[in-house]
């Protein structure tokens, strides 16, 4: 019943992105048989875990999960421990360690905080796939400060073709910003009210978007995969951040002006009529 | 999940519907539940709750205007007994039955307003009509006399824009409770916007306002007082709209940047070869270092 999954995905595209986690959990509760379809197609905010050995934070998602346990990219260990948890081959693990180091530098440069994790796994056809995760949460020190979070999930697959590699990248960014506004103004001027207005409010902007790209890059050795996917992820994040800020957020602001006009519409209408009368008068 | 839990869960989805998309959400949950009988009965309370909270508008029979369905328009006097629940359109002074699924009004009946408060209510209604024309492109407003508190009036405004072909919808709601007993006015403004072209971005804002009405308003005639009250509302809503603009500016200039920079401090993209090289270099030199210290010992 592909139909049913379509309805679930349509629903998730309509419901507030700020409530994705609880809504996905509800949908799984209603249709437990479709849990895998849903978890595989709907991206959710990343969970923060702590590596027991090193105390270092890492990110958990469906890609580093085995049963109820999550693998840390730092120690390669599952938590809770698993005897026979899936781990990458030694060769791929070596690449995974380098990729984690490289994207950790990337994270520091762009996010100046937050957490990153990279997970790689072998594919049946000889190639490999991976996911690059980045998360930053802003916790306000005062209630008047803005709070927010950024989650990005970049899933890629690669197939080597001689000295070239073909990459397929699917990127999702989830963003949330909340600003609380509180003020009470004392009006000791023109208006006669001594009490003034008391105002209180909150603005929440939430969004999620997914984009795909396929590209070919040259490879010299296995580390080329890191520079290649690095460039692709960086390019994609720049593009998506820009889209969210300029297009998506800009559009929501424009729609407010479609609902309510700051200028007096009646005045504009009257002016237009007057102008028309004037033109008709001149024509006569 | 038990059937009633499944219904509870989809009711929760319905209440989260973005402006103008309730039919799409109901279609989706209809497919998910695939038991129309259970669904229709089960979601009725949620549909009603949604309609009331979202100031859903209805064409009033025998008139050419629309009125708002809300807690204020629900006629409490008729709620007792076995009779059907009735709703009020104060402008045409008619009560009617409302179908929360089809969003249609039927069985219009004349309604007798309380004469003591009708002059002020009517004046407020007239002033809000002019305000609506001046600032909203597709707005509807309703002005009620409170059914519980004498000398209290409730002014509601809703403006909707649905543009599914271009993947967006928006709703502006505001409500003002004018109380001539303690000379207060309490207001709420709520804005919801959904933009979903290749993504899902939602804006939701809440604003609450309270003010003590100046004596010049309290002592004035209903007409003059209403005009002044709407002038206050006009200023306040205009200021709010401008402040939302500032909030957007703050979000994109500061908040966004502190989550993720547009470019690193160096103002250029990463040199990935270097990023790997440094690390490799650092590893080599550190392993050389250990080797060197090891050999010198």
Image: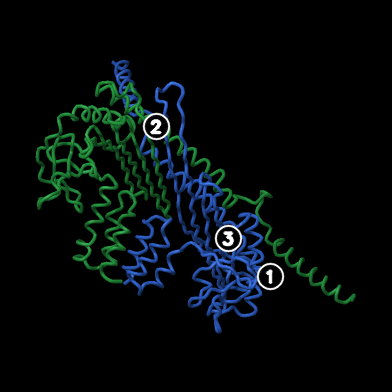
Residue carrying label 2:
B236
The structure's colour scheme is by chain
Relative vertical location of residue A260 with respect to residue B8 in this rendering, above or below:
above
Residue toward you, A20 or A209 = A20
Give the letter of the blue chain: A
Residue A233: image tag: 3
Residue beneath the point at 40% across and 62% down:
A22
Foreground mark, 3 or 2, reads 2
> Can marks 1 and 3 be said to lie on one chain?
yes
Of circles 1 and 3, which is in front?
3
Find out whether the residues at labels 1 and 3 contact each other: C-beta distance under 8 Å: no
Mark seen at residue B119: none
Name the subunit of mark 3: A
Q: Is mark 1 on a helix, strand or loop?
A: loop
Q: What is the spatial separation of the Cα atoms under label 1 and label 2, in whole angstroms?
A: 64 Å
| Image coordinates for residue A173, horizontal then vertical, percent | 50, 57
Q: How crowded is mark 3: few (under 14 residues within 10 Å), some or many (20 or more)?
A: many
Side of A137 where B89 appears, left or right = left
Instruction: Identify which residue is drawn at 39% across, 65% down.
Output: A24
Residue appearing at x 34%, y 44% in the figure:
B171
- Chain bearing tag 1 is A
* Chain assigned green: B
Q: Report in which chain the residue with disc 2 lies.
A: B
Residue at mark 1: A220
Q: Residue furthest front?
A: B182
- Disc 1 packing (10 Å; few <14; some 14–19; many ≥20): few
| Residue B205 image position (x, y, % from top left) | 41, 44
């Amino acid at each position: 019943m592909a139909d049913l999954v379509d309805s679930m995905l349509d629903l998730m595209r309509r419901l507030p992105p700020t409530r994705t986690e609880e809504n996905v959990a509800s949908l799984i509760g209603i249709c437990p048989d479709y849990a895998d379809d849903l978890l595989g197609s709907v991206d959710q905010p990343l969970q923060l875990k702590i590596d027991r050995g090193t105390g270092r934070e890492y990110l958990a998602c469906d890609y580093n999960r085995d049963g109820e346990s999550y693998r840390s990219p730092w120690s390669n260990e599952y938590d809770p421990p698993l005897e026979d948890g899936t781990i990458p081959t030694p060769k791929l693990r070596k690449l995974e360690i380098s990729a984690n180091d490289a994207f950790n530098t990337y994270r520091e440069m762009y996010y100046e905080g937050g957490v990153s994790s990279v997970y790689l796994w072998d594919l049946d056809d000889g190639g490999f796939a991976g996911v690059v995760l980045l998360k930053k949460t802003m916790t306000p020190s005062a209630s008047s400060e803005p709070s927010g979070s950024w989650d990005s999930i970049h899933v890629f697959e690669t197939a080597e073709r001689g000295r070239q590699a073909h990459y397929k990248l699917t990127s999702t960014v989830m963003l949330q910003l909340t600003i609380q506004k509180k003020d009470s103004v004392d009006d000791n001027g023109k208006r006669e009210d001594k009490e003034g207005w008391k105002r209180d409010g909150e603005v929440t902007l939430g969004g999620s978007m997914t984009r795909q790209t396929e590209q070919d890059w040259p490879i010299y050795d296995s580390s080329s995969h890191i520079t290649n996917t690095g460039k692709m992820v960086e390019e994609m994040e720049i593009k998506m951040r820009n889209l969210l800020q300029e297009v998506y957020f800009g559009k929501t602001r424009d729609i407010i002006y479609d609902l309510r006009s700051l200028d007096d519409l009646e005045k504009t209408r009257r002016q237009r009529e007057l102008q028309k009368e004037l033109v008709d008068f001149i024509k006569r | 999940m038990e059937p009633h839990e499944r219904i509870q869960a989809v009711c929760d989805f319905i209440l989260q519907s973005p402006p103008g998309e309730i039919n799409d959400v109901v279609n989706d949950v209809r497919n998910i539940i695939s038991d129309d009988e259970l669904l229709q009965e089960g979601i009725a309370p949620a549909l009603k709750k949604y309609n009331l909270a979202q100031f859903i508008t209805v064409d009033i029979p025998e008139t050419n205007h629309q009125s708002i369905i809300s807690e204020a328009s629900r006629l409490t006097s008729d709620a007792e007994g076995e009779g059907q629940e009735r709703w009020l359109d104060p402008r045409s002074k008619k009560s009617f039955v409302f179908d929360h699924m089809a969003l249609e009004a039927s069985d219009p009946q004349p309604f007798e307003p309380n004469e003591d408060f009708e002059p002020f209510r009517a004046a407020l209604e007239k002033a809000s009509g002019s305000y609506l024309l001046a600032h909203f492109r597709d707005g509807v407003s309703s002005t009620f006399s409170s059914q519980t508190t004498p000398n209290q009036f409730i002014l509601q405004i809703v403006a909707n824009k649905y543009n599914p072909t271009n993947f967006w919808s928006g709703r502006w709601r505001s409500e003002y409770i004018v109380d001539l007993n303690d000379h207060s006015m309490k207001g709420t403004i709520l804005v919801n916007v959904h933009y979903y072209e290749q993504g899902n971005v939602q804006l939701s804002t809440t604003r609450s306002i309270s003010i003590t009405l100046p004596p010049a308003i309290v002592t004035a005639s209903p007409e003059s007082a209403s005009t002044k009250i709407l002038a206050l509302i006009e200023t306040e809503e205009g200021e709010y709209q401008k402040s939302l603009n500032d909030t957007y500016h703050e979000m994109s200039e500061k908040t966004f940047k502190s989550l993720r920079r547009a470019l690193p401090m160096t103002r250029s993209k990463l040199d990935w070869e270097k990023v790997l090289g440094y690390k490799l270099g650092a590893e080599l030199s550190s392993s050389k270092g250990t080797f060197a210290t090891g050999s010198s010992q």
